[in-house]
Amino acid sequence: MDRKVNIGVVGALNLDFVTRSVEGDDAMEGIRSFNRDEERSVSDKDWWSFFYRYLPNRQHSLSPGGSAANTGAAICAIHPQFNVHVVGTIGEDVEGQYLMDREHWYGAKVTPRVSKARSGKAFSYVERGAGRKIAVSPGCNDQFTVDYFDDLPSDLDWLHVSSFASEVANIELAKFLKLARNKYKNAKISIDPGRFLTERSSQKIAIDALRQCDFLFTKQEELLSLAQTPDFGPESNARIAAVDHLFRLCGNDLSVVVERMLSGYSVYVKNSKPVHVEYSSLQSMGSADDIDDTGAGDVFNAGYIYGELRGFSVENRKGIIRSVIRKKLAQPGRMGFFEFARATPIVFASHSHKDKHELRRFIDQFEDTDVSFWEDVEDIRIGEEMIHAIEQGVRQSDFLAVFCSLDSAESGWVAKEMELADQHNVRIIPIVLESSSLRMLPRIRELRYINVPEIGFSKAKEQFLKEVWRR
Protein backbone atom coordinates (compact mmCIF):
# COMPACT_ATOMS: atom_id res chain seq x y z
CA MET A 1 0.00 0.00 0.00
CA ASP A 2 1.78 3.12 -1.23
CA ARG A 3 -1.03 5.45 -0.16
CA LYS A 4 -1.68 6.06 3.49
CA VAL A 5 -3.91 3.58 5.29
CA ASN A 6 -7.33 5.01 6.28
CA ILE A 7 -8.84 3.72 9.52
CA GLY A 8 -12.27 4.73 10.79
CA VAL A 9 -13.16 4.40 14.47
CA VAL A 10 -16.73 4.78 15.72
CA GLY A 11 -17.96 4.61 19.32
CA ALA A 12 -18.38 6.42 22.60
CA LEU A 13 -16.20 9.38 23.56
CA ASN A 14 -15.88 9.40 27.35
CA LEU A 15 -13.82 11.18 29.92
CA ASP A 16 -12.25 8.46 32.10
CA PHE A 17 -11.39 8.74 35.79
CA VAL A 18 -9.43 5.76 37.14
CA THR A 19 -8.68 5.38 40.84
CA ARG A 20 -7.42 2.58 43.08
CA SER A 21 -8.76 1.56 46.48
CA VAL A 22 -6.65 2.46 49.49
CA GLU A 23 -5.81 0.33 52.52
CA GLY A 24 -8.68 0.25 54.96
CA ASP A 25 -11.07 1.63 52.35
CA ASP A 26 -14.60 1.48 53.74
CA ALA A 27 -16.38 3.87 51.35
CA MET A 28 -17.63 1.07 49.14
CA GLU A 29 -21.39 0.85 49.65
CA GLY A 30 -22.61 2.01 46.26
CA ILE A 31 -20.01 0.37 44.05
CA ARG A 32 -19.51 -2.89 46.00
CA SER A 33 -22.75 -4.21 44.50
CA PHE A 34 -21.04 -4.31 41.10
CA ASN A 35 -19.79 -7.72 40.02
CA ARG A 36 -16.09 -8.27 39.45
CA ASP A 37 -14.90 -6.34 36.35
CA GLU A 38 -18.45 -5.15 35.72
CA GLU A 39 -19.20 -2.11 33.57
CA ARG A 40 -22.57 -0.64 34.52
CA SER A 41 -24.54 2.24 33.04
CA VAL A 42 -25.62 4.77 35.66
CA SER A 43 -27.35 8.14 35.68
CA ASP A 44 -25.31 11.33 35.63
CA LYS A 45 -26.40 12.02 39.23
CA ASP A 46 -25.23 8.59 40.41
CA TRP A 47 -21.96 8.99 38.51
CA TRP A 48 -21.14 12.20 40.37
CA SER A 49 -22.04 10.44 43.62
CA PHE A 50 -19.38 7.80 42.88
CA PHE A 51 -16.95 10.52 41.86
CA TYR A 52 -17.21 12.50 45.09
CA ARG A 53 -17.31 9.40 47.29
CA TYR A 54 -14.34 7.49 45.89
CA LEU A 55 -11.98 10.04 44.37
CA PRO A 56 -10.88 12.18 47.34
CA ASN A 57 -7.52 11.29 48.90
CA ARG A 58 -6.74 8.71 46.21
CA GLN A 59 -4.30 8.79 43.34
CA HIS A 60 -6.16 8.89 40.04
CA SER A 61 -5.63 9.36 36.34
CA LEU A 62 -7.75 11.44 34.01
CA SER A 63 -7.83 10.74 30.28
CA PRO A 64 -10.07 10.54 27.21
CA GLY A 65 -11.72 7.16 26.87
CA GLY A 66 -14.33 5.02 25.21
CA SER A 67 -13.38 1.61 23.83
CA ALA A 68 -13.27 2.49 20.13
CA ALA A 69 -11.71 5.90 20.80
CA ASN A 70 -8.94 4.31 22.87
CA THR A 71 -8.28 1.78 20.12
CA GLY A 72 -8.03 4.53 17.49
CA ALA A 73 -5.68 6.64 19.60
CA ALA A 74 -3.51 3.59 20.33
CA ILE A 75 -3.26 2.69 16.61
CA CYS A 76 -2.14 6.25 15.88
CA ALA A 77 0.36 6.14 18.74
CA ILE A 78 1.81 2.86 17.44
CA HIS A 79 1.98 4.01 13.82
CA PRO A 80 1.51 7.78 13.35
CA GLN A 81 1.65 7.39 9.56
CA PHE A 82 -1.83 5.81 9.50
CA ASN A 83 -4.79 8.14 8.89
CA VAL A 84 -7.06 7.45 11.88
CA HIS A 85 -10.49 9.12 11.96
CA VAL A 86 -12.40 9.02 15.28
CA VAL A 87 -16.08 9.99 15.32
CA GLY A 88 -18.39 10.30 18.31
CA THR A 89 -20.43 12.81 20.30
CA ILE A 90 -19.37 15.25 23.03
CA GLY A 91 -21.26 17.82 25.07
CA GLU A 92 -20.95 21.58 25.28
CA ASP A 93 -19.27 21.30 28.67
CA VAL A 94 -15.85 21.22 30.34
CA GLU A 95 -15.55 17.47 29.78
CA GLY A 96 -16.23 17.94 26.07
CA GLN A 97 -13.54 20.62 25.81
CA TYR A 98 -11.05 18.29 27.47
CA LEU A 99 -11.94 15.48 25.05
CA MET A 100 -11.09 17.72 22.11
CA ASP A 101 -7.53 18.49 23.27
CA ARG A 102 -5.49 17.32 20.26
CA GLU A 103 -2.57 15.96 22.28
CA HIS A 104 -4.82 13.21 23.67
CA TRP A 105 -5.25 11.62 20.25
CA TYR A 106 -1.64 11.13 19.07
CA GLY A 107 -2.35 12.47 15.60
CA ALA A 108 -5.77 10.86 15.07
CA LYS A 109 -8.36 13.16 13.52
CA VAL A 110 -11.31 13.55 15.89
CA THR A 111 -14.59 14.75 14.40
CA PRO A 112 -17.16 15.00 17.19
CA ARG A 113 -20.82 15.84 16.97
CA VAL A 114 -21.51 18.47 19.61
CA SER A 115 -24.63 18.00 21.72
CA LYS A 116 -26.37 20.04 24.38
CA ALA A 117 -26.49 16.90 26.52
CA ARG A 118 -23.68 16.14 28.97
CA SER A 119 -20.49 14.45 27.74
CA GLY A 120 -20.06 10.78 28.56
CA LYS A 121 -17.98 9.87 31.61
CA ALA A 122 -16.58 6.64 33.05
CA PHE A 123 -15.42 6.07 36.62
CA SER A 124 -13.18 3.03 37.19
CA TYR A 125 -12.60 1.84 40.74
CA VAL A 126 -9.79 -0.73 40.93
CA GLU A 127 -9.64 -2.87 44.07
CA ARG A 128 -7.02 -5.54 44.69
CA GLY A 129 -8.64 -8.96 44.71
CA ALA A 130 -11.98 -7.60 43.48
CA GLY A 131 -11.09 -6.43 39.98
CA ARG A 132 -12.48 -3.30 38.38
CA LYS A 133 -15.88 -1.74 38.88
CA ILE A 134 -16.75 0.74 36.14
CA ALA A 135 -19.64 3.19 36.32
CA VAL A 136 -20.50 4.78 32.97
CA SER A 137 -22.68 7.83 32.51
CA PRO A 138 -23.34 7.64 28.72
CA GLY A 139 -24.56 11.21 28.33
CA CYS A 140 -24.73 12.28 24.70
CA ASN A 141 -23.16 9.02 23.45
CA ASP A 142 -26.71 7.62 23.40
CA GLN A 143 -27.48 9.99 20.51
CA PHE A 144 -25.51 7.90 17.98
CA THR A 145 -27.20 7.60 14.56
CA VAL A 146 -26.31 6.13 11.17
CA ASP A 147 -25.51 9.55 9.69
CA TYR A 148 -22.06 9.38 11.33
CA PHE A 149 -21.03 8.27 7.83
CA ASP A 150 -20.84 11.96 6.97
CA ASP A 151 -17.77 12.30 9.21
CA LEU A 152 -15.80 9.37 7.77
CA PRO A 153 -13.68 9.25 4.60
CA SER A 154 -15.28 7.80 1.48
CA ASP A 155 -12.58 5.12 1.34
CA LEU A 156 -11.52 3.05 4.36
CA ASP A 157 -9.10 0.16 4.77
CA TRP A 158 -10.42 -0.67 8.24
CA LEU A 159 -13.48 0.27 10.29
CA HIS A 160 -13.52 -0.45 14.02
CA VAL A 161 -16.58 0.05 16.24
CA SER A 162 -17.55 -0.63 19.84
CA SER A 163 -20.87 -0.88 21.60
CA PHE A 164 -22.77 1.80 23.50
CA ALA A 165 -24.50 1.66 26.88
CA SER A 166 -27.90 2.39 25.32
CA GLU A 167 -29.93 -0.29 23.52
CA VAL A 168 -31.28 2.35 21.11
CA ALA A 169 -27.72 3.44 20.20
CA ASN A 170 -26.70 -0.20 19.68
CA ILE A 171 -29.65 -0.77 17.34
CA GLU A 172 -28.41 2.24 15.35
CA LEU A 173 -24.89 0.78 15.44
CA ALA A 174 -26.13 -2.46 13.85
CA LYS A 175 -27.85 -0.44 11.09
CA PHE A 176 -24.69 1.61 10.65
CA LEU A 177 -22.60 -1.55 10.15
CA LYS A 178 -25.01 -2.90 7.53
CA LEU A 179 -24.64 0.31 5.54
CA ALA A 180 -20.88 0.29 6.12
CA ARG A 181 -20.58 -3.25 4.72
CA ASN A 182 -22.14 -2.04 1.46
CA LYS A 183 -20.19 1.21 1.30
CA TYR A 184 -16.72 -0.07 2.27
CA LYS A 185 -16.69 -3.30 0.27
CA ASN A 186 -12.91 -3.79 0.48
CA ALA A 187 -12.47 -2.69 4.08
CA LYS A 188 -12.06 -4.96 7.08
CA ILE A 189 -14.64 -4.32 9.80
CA SER A 190 -14.05 -5.16 13.45
CA ILE A 191 -16.21 -4.84 16.54
CA ASP A 192 -15.57 -4.87 20.27
CA PRO A 193 -19.04 -5.46 21.73
CA GLY A 194 -17.86 -5.01 25.32
CA ARG A 195 -20.19 -5.66 28.23
CA PHE A 196 -23.24 -3.81 26.96
CA LEU A 197 -23.72 -5.56 23.63
CA THR A 198 -22.92 -9.01 25.06
CA GLU A 199 -25.73 -8.94 27.60
CA ARG A 200 -28.28 -11.66 26.90
CA SER A 201 -31.03 -9.14 26.25
CA SER A 202 -28.93 -7.64 23.43
CA GLN A 203 -28.06 -10.86 21.59
CA LYS A 204 -30.24 -10.21 18.52
CA ILE A 205 -28.77 -6.72 18.09
CA ALA A 206 -25.27 -8.13 18.52
CA ILE A 207 -25.77 -10.88 15.93
CA ASP A 208 -27.17 -8.32 13.45
CA ALA A 209 -23.97 -6.32 13.96
CA LEU A 210 -21.63 -9.33 13.80
CA ARG A 211 -23.06 -10.46 10.45
CA GLN A 212 -21.40 -7.40 8.89
CA CYS A 213 -18.00 -7.87 10.57
CA ASP A 214 -14.74 -9.62 9.73
CA PHE A 215 -13.32 -9.56 13.29
CA LEU A 216 -14.86 -9.89 16.73
CA PHE A 217 -12.63 -8.78 19.63
CA THR A 218 -13.88 -10.18 22.92
CA LYS A 219 -13.05 -11.76 26.26
CA GLN A 220 -14.11 -15.24 27.37
CA GLU A 221 -16.95 -14.13 29.66
CA GLU A 222 -18.31 -11.77 26.99
CA LEU A 223 -18.04 -14.49 24.34
CA LEU A 224 -20.04 -17.01 26.40
CA SER A 225 -22.71 -14.41 27.19
CA LEU A 226 -22.92 -13.33 23.55
CA ALA A 227 -23.32 -16.91 22.30
CA GLN A 228 -25.55 -17.88 25.25
CA THR A 229 -23.56 -21.05 25.84
CA PRO A 230 -22.74 -22.56 29.26
CA ASP A 231 -19.36 -22.12 30.92
CA PHE A 232 -18.39 -25.68 31.82
CA GLY A 233 -15.46 -28.02 31.27
CA PRO A 234 -12.01 -26.83 30.21
CA GLU A 235 -11.77 -23.15 29.29
CA SER A 236 -10.81 -23.90 25.68
CA ASN A 237 -13.81 -26.24 25.22
CA ALA A 238 -16.19 -23.54 26.42
CA ARG A 239 -14.69 -21.09 23.91
CA ILE A 240 -14.96 -23.57 21.04
CA ALA A 241 -18.63 -24.30 21.81
CA ALA A 242 -19.41 -20.57 21.96
CA VAL A 243 -17.50 -19.79 18.76
CA ASP A 244 -19.16 -22.64 16.84
CA HIS A 245 -22.56 -21.35 17.92
CA LEU A 246 -21.68 -17.83 16.77
CA PHE A 247 -20.52 -19.15 13.40
CA ARG A 248 -23.91 -20.81 12.93
CA LEU A 249 -25.77 -17.67 13.97
CA CYS A 250 -23.73 -15.20 11.92
CA GLY A 251 -23.24 -17.12 8.69
CA ASN A 252 -20.26 -15.02 7.60
CA ASP A 253 -16.48 -15.52 7.61
CA LEU A 254 -15.86 -14.12 11.06
CA SER A 255 -12.52 -14.25 12.88
CA VAL A 256 -13.17 -14.46 16.63
CA VAL A 257 -10.24 -13.07 18.61
CA VAL A 258 -10.43 -13.90 22.32
CA GLU A 259 -8.12 -11.80 24.46
CA ARG A 260 -6.80 -13.57 27.58
CA MET A 261 -5.16 -10.76 29.53
CA LEU A 262 -1.64 -11.55 30.78
CA SER A 263 -1.62 -15.03 29.24
CA GLY A 264 -2.19 -14.58 25.49
CA TYR A 265 -4.97 -14.76 22.92
CA SER A 266 -6.87 -17.30 20.83
CA VAL A 267 -8.08 -16.86 17.25
CA TYR A 268 -10.94 -18.89 15.76
CA VAL A 269 -11.74 -18.94 12.04
CA LYS A 270 -14.47 -21.06 10.48
CA ASN A 271 -13.23 -24.41 9.09
CA SER A 272 -9.72 -23.78 10.45
CA LYS A 273 -7.82 -25.06 13.44
CA PRO A 274 -7.82 -22.56 16.35
CA VAL A 275 -4.57 -20.72 17.00
CA HIS A 276 -3.59 -20.19 20.65
CA VAL A 277 -0.80 -17.70 21.28
CA GLU A 278 0.86 -17.53 24.69
CA TYR A 279 2.78 -14.57 26.10
CA SER A 280 5.98 -15.29 27.95
CA SER A 281 6.72 -12.07 29.81
CA LEU A 282 3.45 -10.48 30.96
CA GLN A 283 2.86 -13.06 33.69
CA SER A 284 5.87 -11.70 35.56
CA MET A 285 4.00 -8.42 36.05
CA GLY A 286 1.78 -10.10 38.64
CA SER A 287 -1.77 -11.37 38.79
CA ALA A 288 -4.74 -9.57 37.31
CA ASP A 289 -5.73 -8.66 40.88
CA ASP A 290 -2.65 -6.50 41.24
CA ILE A 291 -2.73 -4.76 37.85
CA ASP A 292 -4.99 -2.03 36.57
CA ASP A 293 -5.78 -3.30 33.08
CA THR A 294 -8.43 -0.64 32.38
CA GLY A 295 -8.18 0.09 28.66
CA ALA A 296 -5.68 -2.71 28.03
CA GLY A 297 -8.27 -4.55 25.93
CA ASP A 298 -8.52 -1.52 23.65
CA VAL A 299 -4.74 -1.51 23.32
CA PHE A 300 -4.87 -5.22 22.49
CA ASN A 301 -7.34 -4.43 19.68
CA ALA A 302 -4.99 -1.74 18.34
CA GLY A 303 -2.00 -4.10 18.36
CA TYR A 304 -3.95 -6.84 16.60
CA ILE A 305 -5.32 -4.48 13.93
CA TYR A 306 -1.85 -3.03 13.41
CA GLY A 307 -0.37 -6.51 12.98
CA GLU A 308 -3.09 -7.44 10.50
CA LEU A 309 -2.50 -4.29 8.44
CA ARG A 310 1.26 -4.91 8.48
CA GLY A 311 0.76 -8.46 7.18
CA PHE A 312 1.96 -10.36 10.25
CA SER A 313 0.73 -13.89 10.89
CA VAL A 314 -1.53 -14.50 13.88
CA GLU A 315 1.41 -15.92 15.82
CA ASN A 316 3.87 -13.19 14.88
CA ARG A 317 1.58 -10.41 16.07
CA LYS A 318 2.44 -11.54 19.57
CA GLY A 319 5.55 -9.37 19.88
CA ILE A 320 3.68 -6.19 18.91
CA ILE A 321 0.65 -6.93 21.08
CA ARG A 322 2.64 -8.00 24.12
CA SER A 323 4.84 -4.93 23.87
CA VAL A 324 2.02 -2.38 23.73
CA ILE A 325 0.04 -4.10 26.50
CA ARG A 326 3.11 -4.19 28.74
CA LYS A 327 3.63 -0.46 28.22
CA LYS A 328 -0.05 0.20 28.90
CA LEU A 329 -0.04 -1.82 32.12
CA ALA A 330 3.06 0.01 33.34
CA GLN A 331 1.23 3.36 33.33
CA PRO A 332 -2.35 4.32 34.29
CA GLY A 333 -4.77 5.83 31.80
CA ARG A 334 -3.22 7.12 28.58
CA MET A 335 0.29 7.72 29.92
CA GLY A 336 1.57 4.40 28.57
CA PHE A 337 0.62 5.50 25.04
CA PHE A 338 3.63 7.80 24.90
CA GLU A 339 5.87 4.76 24.46
CA PHE A 340 3.83 3.10 21.71
CA ALA A 341 5.56 4.82 18.80
CA ARG A 342 8.71 2.89 19.72
CA ALA A 343 6.85 -0.16 20.89
CA THR A 344 8.48 -2.68 18.60
CA PRO A 345 10.99 -2.52 15.75
CA ILE A 346 9.77 -4.54 12.75
CA VAL A 347 12.51 -6.71 11.22
CA PHE A 348 12.10 -8.53 7.90
CA ALA A 349 14.04 -11.83 8.17
CA SER A 350 15.59 -12.46 4.73
CA HIS A 351 16.90 -16.04 4.55
CA SER A 352 17.08 -19.31 2.66
CA HIS A 353 14.50 -21.87 3.76
CA LYS A 354 17.44 -24.28 4.20
CA ASP A 355 18.64 -22.09 7.09
CA LYS A 356 15.32 -22.27 8.96
CA HIS A 357 16.86 -24.03 11.96
CA GLU A 358 19.60 -21.42 12.40
CA LEU A 359 17.09 -18.63 11.79
CA ARG A 360 14.82 -19.90 14.55
CA ARG A 361 17.77 -20.33 16.88
CA PHE A 362 18.56 -16.64 16.43
CA ILE A 363 14.99 -15.30 16.49
CA ASP A 364 13.89 -17.36 19.50
CA GLN A 365 16.33 -15.36 21.62
CA PHE A 366 14.09 -12.30 21.16
CA GLU A 367 10.98 -13.90 22.70
CA ASP A 368 11.03 -11.57 25.71
CA THR A 369 12.10 -8.44 23.85
CA ASP A 370 10.11 -5.82 21.94
CA VAL A 371 11.50 -6.85 18.53
CA SER A 372 9.09 -8.44 16.00
CA PHE A 373 10.27 -10.48 13.02
CA TRP A 374 8.46 -10.79 9.67
CA GLU A 375 9.38 -14.27 8.41
CA ASP A 376 8.25 -13.96 4.76
CA VAL A 377 6.55 -17.26 3.75
CA GLU A 378 5.07 -17.85 7.21
CA ASP A 379 3.57 -14.36 7.20
CA ILE A 380 2.06 -14.55 3.71
CA ARG A 381 -1.62 -15.42 3.54
CA ILE A 382 -2.78 -18.36 1.43
CA GLY A 383 -3.75 -17.09 -2.02
CA GLU A 384 -1.69 -13.90 -1.73
CA GLU A 385 0.78 -13.10 -4.49
CA MET A 386 4.28 -13.83 -3.14
CA ILE A 387 6.23 -10.96 -4.70
CA HIS A 388 3.57 -8.40 -3.77
CA ALA A 389 3.44 -9.64 -0.15
CA ILE A 390 7.23 -9.69 0.17
CA GLU A 391 7.57 -6.19 -1.30
CA GLN A 392 4.95 -4.90 1.12
CA GLY A 393 6.65 -6.71 4.02
CA VAL A 394 10.07 -5.21 3.19
CA ARG A 395 8.68 -1.72 2.58
CA GLN A 396 6.78 -1.64 5.88
CA SER A 397 9.68 -2.97 7.97
CA ASP A 398 12.21 -0.92 9.91
CA PHE A 399 15.13 -3.25 9.08
CA LEU A 400 16.03 -6.09 6.72
CA ALA A 401 18.06 -8.73 8.58
CA VAL A 402 19.90 -10.79 5.94
CA PHE A 403 20.92 -14.22 7.27
CA CYS A 404 24.05 -14.93 5.24
CA SER A 405 24.97 -18.52 4.38
CA LEU A 406 26.13 -20.40 1.31
CA ASP A 407 22.49 -21.24 0.58
CA SER A 408 21.18 -17.69 0.99
CA ALA A 409 24.04 -16.41 -1.22
CA GLU A 410 22.52 -18.46 -4.05
CA SER A 411 18.90 -17.55 -3.26
CA GLY A 412 17.13 -15.38 -5.82
CA TRP A 413 14.58 -14.35 -3.18
CA VAL A 414 17.25 -13.07 -0.77
CA ALA A 415 18.82 -11.05 -3.58
CA LYS A 416 15.40 -9.61 -4.50
CA GLU A 417 14.65 -8.72 -0.87
CA MET A 418 17.95 -6.81 -0.56
CA GLU A 419 17.15 -4.99 -3.80
CA LEU A 420 13.71 -4.03 -2.42
CA ALA A 421 15.31 -2.81 0.82
CA ASP A 422 17.60 -0.51 -1.17
CA GLN A 423 14.66 0.77 -3.21
CA HIS A 424 12.60 1.61 -0.13
CA ASN A 425 15.47 2.89 2.05
CA VAL A 426 15.13 0.05 4.56
CA ARG A 427 18.37 -0.43 6.47
CA ILE A 428 20.09 -3.80 5.95
CA ILE A 429 21.67 -5.59 8.93
CA PRO A 430 23.67 -8.65 7.82
CA ILE A 431 23.68 -11.65 10.19
CA VAL A 432 26.52 -13.90 9.00
CA LEU A 433 25.84 -17.58 9.73
CA GLU A 434 28.71 -18.90 7.57
CA SER A 435 31.82 -16.75 7.14
CA SER A 436 32.63 -18.42 3.84
CA SER A 437 29.43 -16.97 2.34
CA LEU A 438 30.89 -13.45 2.38
CA ARG A 439 33.01 -14.08 -0.71
CA MET A 440 29.75 -14.79 -2.58
CA LEU A 441 27.97 -11.68 -1.25
CA PRO A 442 29.83 -8.56 -2.42
CA ARG A 443 26.90 -6.34 -1.36
CA ILE A 444 27.22 -7.60 2.23
CA ARG A 445 31.00 -7.19 2.35
CA GLU A 446 30.47 -3.44 1.91
CA LEU A 447 28.44 -3.31 5.15
CA ARG A 448 29.22 -3.74 8.80
CA TYR A 449 27.90 -7.16 9.77
CA ILE A 450 27.27 -9.37 12.81
CA ASN A 451 29.50 -12.43 12.63
CA VAL A 452 27.74 -15.26 14.49
CA PRO A 453 30.53 -17.90 14.08
CA GLU A 454 32.98 -15.46 15.67
CA ILE A 455 30.94 -14.10 18.62
CA GLY A 456 28.17 -16.69 19.14
CA PHE A 457 24.38 -16.34 19.18
CA SER A 458 24.08 -14.67 22.58
CA LYS A 459 26.46 -11.80 21.80
CA ALA A 460 24.98 -11.56 18.30
CA LYS A 461 21.61 -10.92 19.94
CA GLU A 462 23.07 -8.15 22.14
CA GLN A 463 24.77 -6.51 19.16
CA PHE A 464 21.60 -6.73 17.08
CA LEU A 465 19.47 -5.15 19.82
CA LYS A 466 21.88 -2.22 20.12
CA GLU A 467 21.60 -1.62 16.37
CA VAL A 468 17.80 -1.70 16.11
CA TRP A 469 17.34 0.62 19.09
CA ARG A 470 19.85 3.16 17.71
CA ARG A 471 17.24 4.34 15.25
Image: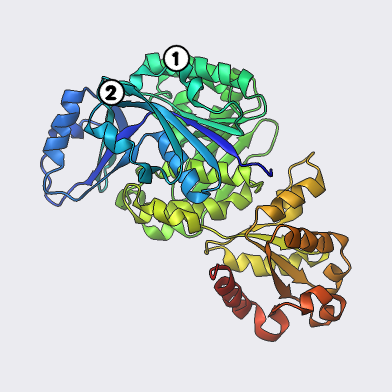
From the viewer's perspective, tell me whether residue 63 is left or right of residue 112: left
Q: Amino acid at mark 2?
A: Gly
From the viewer's perspective, tell me whether residue 292 is left or right of residue 395: left
> Between disc 2 and disc 1, whose residue precedes?
2
Q: Residue at x 72, y 82 (%)?
A: 453
Residue 377, image x, y percentages: 76, 52
Q: Residue at x 45, y 33 (%)?
A: 86
The residue singled out by tag 1 in the image is: 171
From the viewer's perspective, tell me whether residue 233 is left or right of residue 101: right
Q: Residue at x 63, y 40 (%)?
A: 274
Quarter location, residue 36: top left
Q: Amino acid at mark 1?
A: Ile
The residue singled out by tag 2 in the image is: 139
Label 2 – label 1 distance at C-alpha? 17 Å
Image quadrant holding the N terminus, namely top right
Mark 2 crowdedness (10 Å alpha carbons): few <14, some 14-19, many ≥20:
many
- In the displayed structure, 343 sits above or below 183; it is below
Residue 444, image x, y percentages: 77, 75
- In the displayed structure, 33 sits above or below 386; it is above
